[in-house]
Image (tube, rainbow, N blue to C red):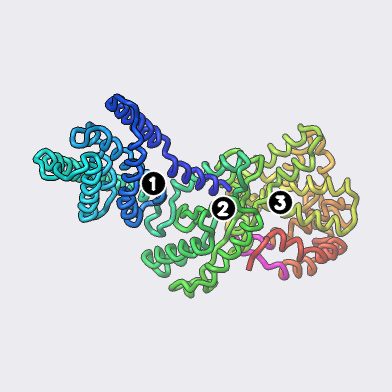
């Protein structure tokens, strides 16, 4: 819609140049006033006859001007030229012929027409045609041709020819220099916003354009979706094929993105192996469809040397974020899309993830209630995300799995509400554990493992003092207990473990198994489910594992959106 509005405004500005119309009106009025003042007597009926004759003669110029005009809006420009020449010819006809003060205006109008011609012979033809019309105008004035053989006539003709060609040459020189400067300026501008490897827009233009489009989205003009694209294992690919072929692969990815996206989408390269697409006036569903096309097109393209990769093919992971009311800055939208992309990279590469805000979901649920709980949860979630992105995304997924289990078991609405908050915050205690330990690639030593096991206690210490959150304390405290009594922190067994904690144990373990971690790769859904089944009665409550196996396929697919 905005594109249509802009195009309409461009047409209006092009068709009706206000400054030009004001100049034209002033020009006509001044010349008409001068003509009436010089006439000094009542207008004669012959004026009408002369106007019709001269108008017909000027059609000769109009026809040529029309068929040789290369600019838009030809009809309007031709009519303007005919009216201009007819008006000045009329003034010359009725104000003394060779003695008319309007002769200079006549030659200026011819020069204006000639300036727009591309070839010299066209300018000469304009001059000869103007000369013919001038002769006919003078003939109508004098009713004889004697003026044609006078020195005064030819001096004026030569003078006018000099003025015509002089103006044309000077204006063309100025115009040529202006176009040259504009071209150089345009090239410099294009270089400043263009990525040299792919030919796409660069990081600088991306931020400028995203801010502009977000302003339109916030004004309610249209929807806006951002797609972040990261090439999987591109550093490994670049190492195998070399920098030159790596750049060629990046260029090919850029071409794929341009082919798959729409003309009004903004395709950019952000850094070495990351791209972005700003989808303007696009629904979330259209963005999903486009993302699938991008992912499939990159996977199916035959990149030179991709067989050297461990997976045998170069693929891409994509994260999507759509503008919503709680987004205030472009960076927030970027962070959301990047968060979704991170989830794909964390779990299964060559996939697509749509950003889903945990806080937005809480806000909808708590609409109309005391805002203190909402603010408390928001603060905790912000701290968790700043501390460890894995823990934050993990909590979102555990919530989805836990809620699906609870619904399958048929627990009450009130327990489902408590379960949701507990799932959100079950690992909040990890903010007390250093990132080095949380992301350690090797095996943890005894002291590190003892500290990790304390995160449930840390979580309770954080949550327990807070109003309205005391109900989730048992689930947080015991979600690492084992059904056989060998878990922590207290070694509870069987039904002594709170129900919500037993649910969280299954959901938490499944997500941990299906997520990439620094020390191991992710399992597939089937392998992880088999692991749950193998530990029924040991680590897990058999009844809860059975409930989860009934719903895991649908929930896991929704959580990943699209992966292969």
Who is closer to the viewer here, 231 or 251?
A: 251
Nearest-to-viewer mark from 3 and 1: 1
Q: Which mark is residue 79?
A: 1
Q: Residues within 10 Å of mark 3 (few under 14, many from 20)?
A: some
Position of residue 141 in the picture relative to residue 432 (left or right): left
- What residue span does the magenta drawing correspond to? 514-526
- The picture places residue 339, in percent across and down from the top left corner, at 61, 50
Q: Which mark is residue 396?
A: 3
Position of residue 149 in the picture relative to residue 1 (left or right): left
Q: Is residue 367 magenta?
A: no
For image coordinates 66% across by 57% down, the residue present is 285
- Gap in angstroms between the C-alphas marked 3 and 1: 68 Å
Q: Which mark is residue 370?
A: none
User: In which quadrant will I find the C terminus?
Assistant: bottom right
Q: Residues within 10 Å of mark 1 (few under 14, many from 20)?
A: some
Residue situated furthest left in the rendering:
151
Could you say whether the residue bearing mark 3 is in a helix, strand or loop?
A: helix
Nearest-to-viewer mark from 2 and 1: 1
Q: Is residue 524 magenta?
A: yes
Q: Residues within 10 Å of mark 2 (few under 14, many from 20)?
A: many
The residue under label 2 is 279
For image coordinates 33% across by 28% down, the residue present is 30
- The picture places residue 491, in percent across and down from the top left corner, at 82, 53
For image coordinates 80% across by 68% down, the residue present is 533
Could you say whether the residue bearing mark 1 is in a helix, strand or loop?
A: helix
| Mark 2 vs 1, N-terminal side | 1
Nearest-to-viewer mark from 2 and 3: 2
- Gap in angstroms between the C-alphas marked 2 and 3: 26 Å
Who is closer to the viewer here, 450 or 94?
A: 94
């Amino acid at each position: 819609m905005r594109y249509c509005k802009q195009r309409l405004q461009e047409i209006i500005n092009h068709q009706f140049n206000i400054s030009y119309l004001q100049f034209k009106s002033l020009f006509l009025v001044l010349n008409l006033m001068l003509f009436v003042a010089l006439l000094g007597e009542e207008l004669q009926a012959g004026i009408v006859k002369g106007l019709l004759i001269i108008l017909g003669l000027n059609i000769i110029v109009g026809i040529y001007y029309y068929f040789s005009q290369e600019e838009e809006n030809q009809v309007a420009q031709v009519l303007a030229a005919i009216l201009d020449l007819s008006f000045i010819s009329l003034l010359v006809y009725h104000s003394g012929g060779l003695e008319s003060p309007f002769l200079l205006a006549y030659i200026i109008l011819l020069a204006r027409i000639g300036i727009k011609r591309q070839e010299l012979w066209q300018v000469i033809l304009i001059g000869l045609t103007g000369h013919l019309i001038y002769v006919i105008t003078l003939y109508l004035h004098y009713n004889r041709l004697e003026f044609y053989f006078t020195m005064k006539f030819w001096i004026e003709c030569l003078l006018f020819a000099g003025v015509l060609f002089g103006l044309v040459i000077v204006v063309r020189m100025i115009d040529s220099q202006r176009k040259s400067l504009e071209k150089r300026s345009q090239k410099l501008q294009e270089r400043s916003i263009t990525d040299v490897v792919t030919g796409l827009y660069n990081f600088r233009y991306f931020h400028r354009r995203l801010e502009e489009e977000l302003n339109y989205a916030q004004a309610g003009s249209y929807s806006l979706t951002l797609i972040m694209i990261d090439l999987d294992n591109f550093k490994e690919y670049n190492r195998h094929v070399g920098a030159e072929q790596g750049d060629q692969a990046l260029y090919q990815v850029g071409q794929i993105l341009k082919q798959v996206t729409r003309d009004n989408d903004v395709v950019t390269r952000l850094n070495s192996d990351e791209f972005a697409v700003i989808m303007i006036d696009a629904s979330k569903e259209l963005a999903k469809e486009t993302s699938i096309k991008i992912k499939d097109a990159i996977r199916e393209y035959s990149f030179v040397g991709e067989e050297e990769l461990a997976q045998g093919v170069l693929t891409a992971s994509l994260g999507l974020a759509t503008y919503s009311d709680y987004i205030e800055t472009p960076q927030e939208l970027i962070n959301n899309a990047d968060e979704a992309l991170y989830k794909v990279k964390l779990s299964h590469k060559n996939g697509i993830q749509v950003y889903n805000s945990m806080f937005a979901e809480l806000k909808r649920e708590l609409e109309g209630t005391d805002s203190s709980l909402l603010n408390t949860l928001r603060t905790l979630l912000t701290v968790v995300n700043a501390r460890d992105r894995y823990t934050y995304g993990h909590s979102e997924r555990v919530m989805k799995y836990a809620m699906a289990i609870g619904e399958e078991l048929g627990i009450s609405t009130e327990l489902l509400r408590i379960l949701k908050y507990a799932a959100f915050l079950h690992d909040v205690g990890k903010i007390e554990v250093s990132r080095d330990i949380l992301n350690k690639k090797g095996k943890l030593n005894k002291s590190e493992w003892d500290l990790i096991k304390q995160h449930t206690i840390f979580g309770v210490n954080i949550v327990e003092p807070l109003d309205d959150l005391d109900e989730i304390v048992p689930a947080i405290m015991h979600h690492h207990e084992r059904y056989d009594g060998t878990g922590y922190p207290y070694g509870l067994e069987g039904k002594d473990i709170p129900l919500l904690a037993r649910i969280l144990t299954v959901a938490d373990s499944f997500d941990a198994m299906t997520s990439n971690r620094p020390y191991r790769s992710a399992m597939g859904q089937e392998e992880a489910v088999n692991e749950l089944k193998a530990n029924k009665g040991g680590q897990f409550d058999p009844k809860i594992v059975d409930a989860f196996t009934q719903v895991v396929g649908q929930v896991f697919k929704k959580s990943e959106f699209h992966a292969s």
